[in-house]
Amino acid sequence: MRTISHWIGGKPADGTSGRFGPVTNPATGEQTGQVALADAADVDAAVAAAVDAWASWRTTSLATRTRLLFSYRDLIERHKTELAEILTAEHGKVLSDAMGEVSRGLEVVEFACGIPQLLKGGYSEGASTGVDVYSIRQPLGVVAGITPFNFPAMVPLWMFPIAIACGNAFVLKPSEKDPSAALRVAELFSEAGLPDGVLNVVHGEKEAVDRLLTHPDVAAVSFVGSTPIARYVYETGTSHGKRIQALGGAKNHMVVLPDADMDLAADAAVSAGYGSAGERCMAISVVVAVGTAGDDLIPKMKERIAGLRIGAGTDPEADMGPLVTRVHRDRVAGYVDRGQDEGADVVVDGRGLVVQDHEEGFFLGVSLLDRVTPDMDVYRDEIFGPVLSVVRVDSYDDAMALVNDSRWGNGTAIFTRDGGVARQFQLDAKAGMVGVNVPIPVPVAYYSFGGWKESLFGDSHIYGPEGVHFYTRGKVVTSRWPDPHSRGVDLGFPQNR
Ligand code: NAD
C-alpha cells in the first residue's frame, strides 16, 4: 500500500512512531494509502531541521527569496492539473472546483512574490539632531501551520509562502484525511530551489499538534479548522508563549431582500450552499429570506437543484462530489433527520442517494430545508455538508439580528438592489467578510481573510498584509554616528532636540 511520508529536511521521512492512518478515495470508499502519523519525536525532528535551515534562511537576500517565489509560482502553475487530481482523489471535490482551489492558493504565492515591497520599513532622517530612526520587520524564526481537510492545498498555501517569504522556516501539519497535496506542494517548492529544511511537513493528529503547540523552538502557529480545536490551539499555544492565529468554523448567512434579483440570488444560494458538497468554511448554510423573498426564491432554487448532477469528482459532468468520509456523510445526513423531527419543511431531500457504480462512495444528495427556526439544531450547528436552511423573517432588522446573534462571524452576504441598505448592512454586520450580491466573499490575496467572534481566535487575519504582519515582528532602530558635538554623559530620559 502507498505510504504518504513526512517531508523533513528536504526529503521524505517515514518517522519513527510506527503509526499510520488510512487515506481513502471518497468516491469509491476504498482505502488508497496510509499516512504516517507523527509522534513527538517526529515533530522534534522536523522542528530541528527548520531551526538549522533558519540560521541561513533569515539572512538570505530579498532578491534570492523573490526569485525563488517566482520559480515556485511557475511550477505550481505547470502542475495545477496534477495537484487538482490529487485533491479530487483524497478530498472528493470535483476537478473544476479543485482547479479553483489551486488557483486561489496560487494567488497567495503571487502576492508573496512582492515581498520586497511588503517588508519595506520607514525611515526618519534627523528625528533628533544627528539622530536617524528607522523601522524594520524581522522574521519570527520557526513557525507552524495546522490545516483542515476541506482545502488541502489552498489553506497551506495561505500560510507558508508568506511565512517563508518573510524569512521564517516552516513546519506544516496538514489534515491527516487528505495529506498528499501538502506533500506535493512542499516537493515543488524544493524543486524550485528552496533550501532543505525551510519547509517541512509532518502528518499526524492531536499528538503532533500538541507537540507543535508546546515546542520551545516554535514561535508562532497558524491554525485553520473547527471552532473547538481553534479555541484549544489558541489557548494552549498562547499559554506556551506563542503567537497564534486560529481560524474556526462558520455558519454563513445570506440575506435576501424582496427587491433582490431573484435569479441571481437563486444561482448564488445553490452554488454557495452546495459547491464542494457544502464543505467550505465560506459556504452559505443559511438563507435568510425577508418578507416575500422566500416565496419567490424557493421555486427558483428547486429548479436549479433539480439540474445538479452528483457523481465522482473525476466525472466532468458532475457538479458535486462525495463527502470526505463515511462518518461525516452519515453525520450530515443525520442533520436532515433532525431538521425534519424539529419541524422544518424538507423541500428537497438528499438522503438515500446512490451513485451508480459508486455504491460504496460517501455520497449524499443536496437537501433544502425551509421554515427553519433559530432554536433548531440544524440552524445552530455547523453541519458542513450539502444542507441549506431557509429562515423566513419579516424585516431587514430581523435578518440583521440573526446575522449578529450567531456565535460565528466568518462571512455573510446580502442580496438586494438597494445600495443604501447594502451599505448599512456592511456597516453593521458582525462578520469579517461581507458580500454584496456576492455569496462567497473570500478576499483576494492582497487583502486578508478572517472572521469575527468564534470564527477567529487571535488578532490577525490570515494572508495578505495581516499575514506579513503575523509572520514578522517590528523593530525600531535609533542611530547616531559619532559626532563631536553630542558627547557627554546625560542621565535624563532621552529627549528629542
Ligand atoms: P478539525 O478542527 O477537525 O481539524 C483541523 C486540524 O486540527 C487538522 O489538522 C486536525 O488533524 C487537527 N486536529 C483535529 N482534532 C484535533 C485535536 N483534538 N487536537 C489537536 N488537533 C486536532 O477541522 P476539519 O474537520 O479538518 O475541517 C473542517 C472545519 O474547518 C470546519 O469547522 C470549517 O468551518 C473549518 N474551516 C475554517 C476555515 C476558516 O478560514 N475559518 C477554513 C476552512 C475550514
Image (cartoon, rainbow, N blue to C red):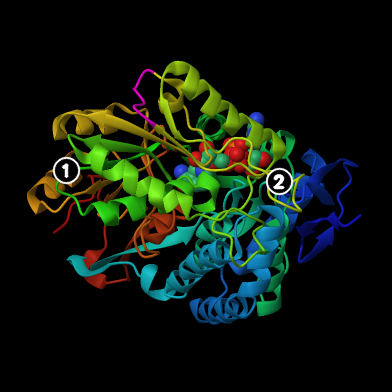
- The residue that label 2 is drawn on is 177
Q: Secondary structure at mark 2?
A: loop
Distance from mark 2 CB to nearest ligand 1 atom below 8 Å: yes
Q: Is residue 142 left or right of residue 356?
A: left
Q: Amino acid at mark 1?
A: Pro
Q: Is residue 214 visible?
A: no
Q: CA distance from mark 2 to mark 1?
A: 42 Å
Q: Residue at x 48, y 48 (%)?
A: 274
Dot in front, 2 or 1: 1
- Residue 129 placement (x, y as % from top left): 17, 66
- Is residue 191 or residue 76 the one in the foreground? 76
Label 1: which residue?
Answer: 258
Residue 147 belongs to the span the image colors magenta: no
Looking at the rendering, the stretch of residues picked out in magenta corresponds to 370-375
Magenta run includes residue 374: yes
Q: How busy is the neighbourhood of tag 2: few (under 14 within 10 Å), some, or many (20 plus)?
A: many
- In the rendered image, residue 70, in percent from the top left (x then y), is placed at 53, 80
Q: Residue 173 placed where, x, y %?
A: 67, 48
Q: Is residue 265 visible?
A: yes
Residue 334 in the image, given as x and y percentages of width and height: 59, 26
The residue closer to the viewer here, 3 or 145, is: 3
